[in-house]
Amino acid sequence: MLSYQEARDWLQQRARPLTLRQTVALPQAAGRVLAEPVEAGIDVPPHPNSAMDGYAVRCAELSGPLPVSQRIPAGADPQALQPGSVARIFTGAPIPAGADAVVMQEQATVDEAGLVSFSVAPRPGQNIRPRGEDIARGQCVIAAGRRLSPADLGLAASIGLAALPVLPALRVAVFFTGDELVEPGQPLAPGQIYNSNRYWLQPALQRLGCEVIDLGRVGDALEPTRQLLRDAAAVADVIVTCGGVSVGEEDHVRAAVEAEGELTLWQVAIKPGKPLAFGRVGEADFIGLPGNPVSGFVTLQTLVRPFLLLRMGLKPDEAAPARHRADFEWTRPDPRRSEFLRVRKVAGDGGWMLQLYPQQSSGALTSCAWADGLAWLAPGQAVSPGDELAYLPLDGQ
Ligand code: AMP
Ligand code: MG
């Protein structure tokens, strides 16, 4: 049996980051991984501009009321400020040459002759946003290998880029095995259960940034499973299946992968979890998750997620997990396996506390829906109230 850390390292060593590059328009680039660093070709803002609606002035000239020599709305290309005058100016408009401050309109009075005087003496530079205040030309504004956030896309637009070089989305084909599975919306016949895994796995993969190709369900039979593996390998970078990887005679995924490619099947010392299959079919990686919903969920979060992130060209977070105090007791630890308890982080007297979902059975999907994280226990680790535990957030999963 592999330890949790061994299985994780083993998988990560085999995660080949995508090498293809493509250029996509900004609206399509959200959530994609940037392939090359982005450098600014211009200063932002490209010209000094007014932070206020008011008057552009030369501070040294403000001994008495002055006439307004020009009007500068945003988007205008102003003339130099005439000596002995002020310019009416609006937020975002370029500062005219010769002006060194903007006085906000609330501090200005215009007399009947149209001359402007100010209630407060301005300081040079006041209310002027200098050229390059945000970004200097030549500066690297987005590092390669970063998943593009909404703010990153705004940043790219602010330096005039309409498209960005990104890695392609990782294509993940999924399918679900089991004669007992029925899709929600259908009536349940005796012996059947609903295919719940399909409905958390697909969005969980999408949220990671994968392009999911859902191939549906296959019964417990070798030939159809082999066929679906071939179909999956033809369209995907990674194949993820659910169920059928144990060693029972109704578990055909193992034999199907061995016939179509290569397979390594382990017992990983995690609870819930345990069986995890990894291999290759054609050019695609193969990952076989256990069918038990909570086992599959925890295995995806703890082992498969970092593999997929690396595969997508991202770096999984290697920082040590946060530690929070337990608000519960756990007296029957598994002596050989790391346990991932479904917990919730709540504000306590002296900081965050972890609450335990009372039903920790590996079939209880309610625990995953309730939890906002996993408390990670070492093999044999019992918990007393107040103990500090490693906490892995589920990030809205
Ligand atoms: P297996 O790994 O195929 O032996 O399945 C283990 C347990 O998980 C069995 O109780 C299955 O009925 C259940 N199971 C397998 N696949 C699913 C699924 N897609 N949705 C819900 N339960 C499942
Ligand atoms: Mg099964």
Image (spheres, rainbow, N blue to C red):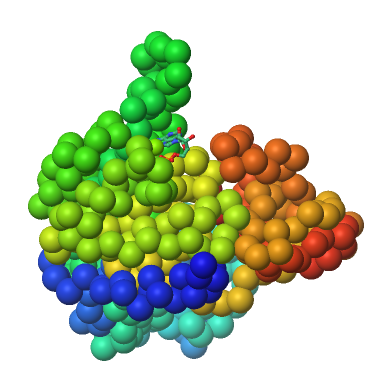
Residue 9 is left or right of residue 360, and the answer is left
* Residue drawn at 39 percent across, 26 percent down: 180
Residue 140 is left or right of residue 397, and the answer is left
Number of marks in picture: 0
Q: Residue 58: x, y in percent?
A: 43, 82
* Residue drawn at 49 percent across, 41 percent down: 292
Q: Residue 149: x, y in percent?
A: 37, 61
Can the viewer see residue 183?
yes
* Residue drawn at 34 percent across, 71 percent down: 310
* Residue drawn at 34 percent across, 28 percent down: 179
Up the image or down, 89 lies above or below 239; here it is: below
Q: Residue 357: x, y in percent?
A: 72, 42
Up the image or down, 386 lies above or below 245; here it is: below
Up the image or down, 189 lies above or below 372; here it is: above
Query: Outermost residue, front direction?
Result: 249
Q: Name the one closer to the observer, 151 or 30.
A: 30
Can the viewer see residue 157?
no
The quarter of the displayed image where residue 72 is located: bottom left
Residue 312 is left or right of residue 181, and the answer is left
Q: Name the one closer to the observer, 240 or 110.
A: 240
Q: Name the one closer to the observer, 81 or 294.
A: 294
Q: Name the one closer to the observer, 89 or 300.
A: 300
Q: Which quadrant of the frame does ligand 1 lie within?
A: top left
Residue 69 is left or right of residue 121, and the answer is left
